[in-house]
Structure formats: structure tokens, C-alpha cells
Amino acid sequence: YTDRNFNQFNTEITGMDNMVHKVTERIVFTQIQSLGLAFLVIIGLMLLLFGLRGGLVSILPNIFPIVFVLGLMGYARFYLNIATAIIASIAIGIVVDDTIHYFFHFRHEFRMTGDRERAMKNALQKVGKALSFTSLILALGFSIFLLSETKILVNFGILSGTAIIIALLGDLFISPVLLSKLNVFKK
């Protein structure tokens, strides 16, 4: 408006709202950059721990909760802001930890039995309960945000809890199927 009607003047938007908006944009941008860097480091770690095939296969259950939550954000019209920008980092941290536990146990069981189906069942029996309990406790912990009167915190609680549960489902269902059907590890 000012450019059209008062072009002889140099105008600039100021004030607390503008400053908060600019800070939020910067935080969201750097969070996205940090997530990209973290993802590259995680890929490198997975390749180092599990070799080329295992590392590449481990990426799928790690991406699943992030893609799901971003899709949910779009569907539910949750905007990307300071609180929602960190959810992907939370999800990837949890899912990577759970994926490493499951992959290590699967690889160990496969080397012991030589049977992928048996290795899948044994690994799930050994780590499935622990993965489930820790993820459910974390999701319940984040559900406290649902009691907030601040919408941004309620959305954070919804999306964080969802990301944690979807990450768990990915590690309990996607990882075992991928490892039992694909020839990822050698005996």
C-alpha cells in the first residue's frame, strides 16, 4: 500500500510483531537446515554401522514418521512455526535410536540362526517391549501439552505424540518386514 500511494517515502515495517515474525522465520529456516544436516549424519552412521544395504534399508523407517507428520500438518492445516519445526528432530532422534536397537538385534539373531524369519521374531521378542514402553511413555509425556490453553503448544503435543507413535509403528512393522524380506545382512 505504501509503495503504491507514498512511493516518495522509504517505509519499513517495525514493532514487536514484525520482530517476532522475523525471528520465527529464522528459527524455522535454521531448524530445517539442522534437520538436513542431522539426516546426512544419520545416513552416514547407518552406513557405517550396517553397511551399504543395511544403511539404505534403515532410512525407510526413519523417514516414515517425518513424512507422516508433515502430511498430517498439511491436512490439518497446522502451520510451520517454532514449536512444529522441532517435531521432525524429535521424531528422527527417537526413530533412529529404536531402529539401531532393532537392526543390531536382528543382525545378531540372523548371524546366530541363519534364518531371517526367526531373526525377525527373536529380535522383536527381545526389543519390541522396550521400544513400545519407551515410545508410549514419551508420547504420554508430550500429551501434557494437550492441556495447554495455547494453540501452538496443543499442536506441538498432538504432532509430537503422533510422530513418536508412528515412529514406533515403523520400527515394529516396517523394519522387521524389510529385514526379513530383503537380503540385507550376511550370515
Image (cartoon, rainbow, N blue to C red):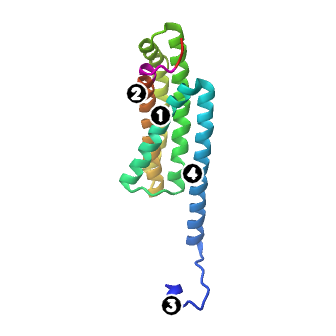
Query: What residue is disc 4 on?
Result: 32
Q: Secondary structure at mark 2?
A: helix
- Residue at image location 49% in from the left, 9% down from the top: 114
As drawn, the residue found furthest toward the left would be 75
Residue 183 inside the magenta-drawn segment: yes
Q: Is residue 99 above or below residue 27?
A: above
Cα–Cα span, label 3 and label 2 = 61 Å
Q: Secondary structure at mark 4?
A: helix
Give yes or no for contact between labels 3 and 1 (Cβ–Cβ under 8 Å).
Answer: no
At which x and y percent is residue 180? Answer: 43, 19
At which x and y percent is residue 90? Answer: 54, 42
Cα–Cα span, label 2 and label 1 = 12 Å
Q: Secondary structure at mark 3?
A: helix
- Residue at image location 53% in from the left, 26% down from the top: 53
Pointer 4 or 3: first along the chain: 3
Pointer 3 or 1: first along the chain: 3
Q: Nearer the viewer, residue 79 or 62?
A: 62
As drawn, the residue found furthest toward the top would be 113
At which x and y percent is residue 77? Answer: 39, 57
